[in-house]
Image (cartoon, rainbow, N blue to C red):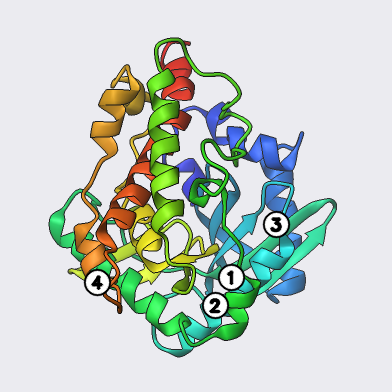
């Protein structure tokens, strides 16, 4: 039985597209979308879709499928506009990591543009996402962050070609970056929350004053529990690869975020100050794994980077989440 039918009692729900699927793919039925992906899989992977294991994605459309030849893959349709060069650079990094036996999804096909949509496929890892609030998991993820950065350190070509990463990695122009999702609106500040703009600016200024431009490394731009799979305390899979190049201490700080609250959970915090506390997580464990190799004091940079990442989450999610919860 198709898994799409196993988690819904209402046939109308089964046959509906998610908000992300509608935004990315346009006015299709679920059957038409599946047929589109099946045709692409037959052409590029040599086998059609036998079973849909899951459908996911908040920014991009992500389908986990089992092909008729038994191979389990993830097919992604990217939300436009798509930085194809960034996808290709990430694919190159994934191949380097896989060759070094780091648990990284292996790119299989794409990115291809088909009928105005950009698709790619990679291997599907089995295993649950861990609880990012668990101290043992945070240390495990810290180790994984340090390991993959160290593996990629020797890839000079990647370093030259990797940019500032997605919006949540950017602080160079101060708060706030151009959002990655049109649902997020940074153009206006809710009345009473002006302090958050000043807080974000102070954090960005602290990073820019103290970051080490000669210690730039490349790493996963959204390294958090939700993009990993852990089985019996072992990191067995990492995915949703997009790269960022930055100071090592900044990398440790901005990647510290634990699993973000879901929109309605975030809305329960009611105000950004409480949302900041709900997201906050001291980055010392990751900084310890990425210790500076000079005598320059680095922990303040790491902590400021952590703060600006959390502040951006609060600035992004509070207005949007509250709007969702009060619909």
Alpha-carbon span between mark 2 and mark 4: 21 Å
Relative vertical location of residue 252 with respect to residue 105 in this rendering, above or below: above
Residue topped by disc 1: 90
Q: Residue at (69%, 43%) from the top-left corner?
A: 31
Q: Residue at (66%, 65%) from the top-left corner?
A: 86
Q: Residue at (59%, 78%) from the top-left corner?
A: 158
Q: Residue at (56%, 54%) from the top-left corner?
A: 63
For marks 2 and 3, the one nearer the N-term is: 3
Alpha-carbon span between mark 3 and mark 4: 41 Å
Element class at badge 3: helix
- Eye-nearest disc, 2 or 4: 4
The reply to whether discs 2 and 1 touch (Cβ–Cβ < 8 Å) is: yes
Residue topped by disc 3: 37
Q: Find residue 264 and report its image quarter.
A: top left
Residue topped by disc 4: 289
Q: Which mark is residue 49?
A: none
Alpha-carbon span between mark 2 and mark 1: 5 Å
- Eye-nearest disc, 1 or 3: 1
Residue topped by disc 2: 93
Residue 268, x across and y down, in percent: 30, 20
Which residue is at the front of the view, 33 or 7? 33
Alpha-carbon span between mark 4 and mark 1: 23 Å
Element class at badge 4: helix
Residue 130, x across and y down, in percent: 26, 56
């Amino acid at each position: 039985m198709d898994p799409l039918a196993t988690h819904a009692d209402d046939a109308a729900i089964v046959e509906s597209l998610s908000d992300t699927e509608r935004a990315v793919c346009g006015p299709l039925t679920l059957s038409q979308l599946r047929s589109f992906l099946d045709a692409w899989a037959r052409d590029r992977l040599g086998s059609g879709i036998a079973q849909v294991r899951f459908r996911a994605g908040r920014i991009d459309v992500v389908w986990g499928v089992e092909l008729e030849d038994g191979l389990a893959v993830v097919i992604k349709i990217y939300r436009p506009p798509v930085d194809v060069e960034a996808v290709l650079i990430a694919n190159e990094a994934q191949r380097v990591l896989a060759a070094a036996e780091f648990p990284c999804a292996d790119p299989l096909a794409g990115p291809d543009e088909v009928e105005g949509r950009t698709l790619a496929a990679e291997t599907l890892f089995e295993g649950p996402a861990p609880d990012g609030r668990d101290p043992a998991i945070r240390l495990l993820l810290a180790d994984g962050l340090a390991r993959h950065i160290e593996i990629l350190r020797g890839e000079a070509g990647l370093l030259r070609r990797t940019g500032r990463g997605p919006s949540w990695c950017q602080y160079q122009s101060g708060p706030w970056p151009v959002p990655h999702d049109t649902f997020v609106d940074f153009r206006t500040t809710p009345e009473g929350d002006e302090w958050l703009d000043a807080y974000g600016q102070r954090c960005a200024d602290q990073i820019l004053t103290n970051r080490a431009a000669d210690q730039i490394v490349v790493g996963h731009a959204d390294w958090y529990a939700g993009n990993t799979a852990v089985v019996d305390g072992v990191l067995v899979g990492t995915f949703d690869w997009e790269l960022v190049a930055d100071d090592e201490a900044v990398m440790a700080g901005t990647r510290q975020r634990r699993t973000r609250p879901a929109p309605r959970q975030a809305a329960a915090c009611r105000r950004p100050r409480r949302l900041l506390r709900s997201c906050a997580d001291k980055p010392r464990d990751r900084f310890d794994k990425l210790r500076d190799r000079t005598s320059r004091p680095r922990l303040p940079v790491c902590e400021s980077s952590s703060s600006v990442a959390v502040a951006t989450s609060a600035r992004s999610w509070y207005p949007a989440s509250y709007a969702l919860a009060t619909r």
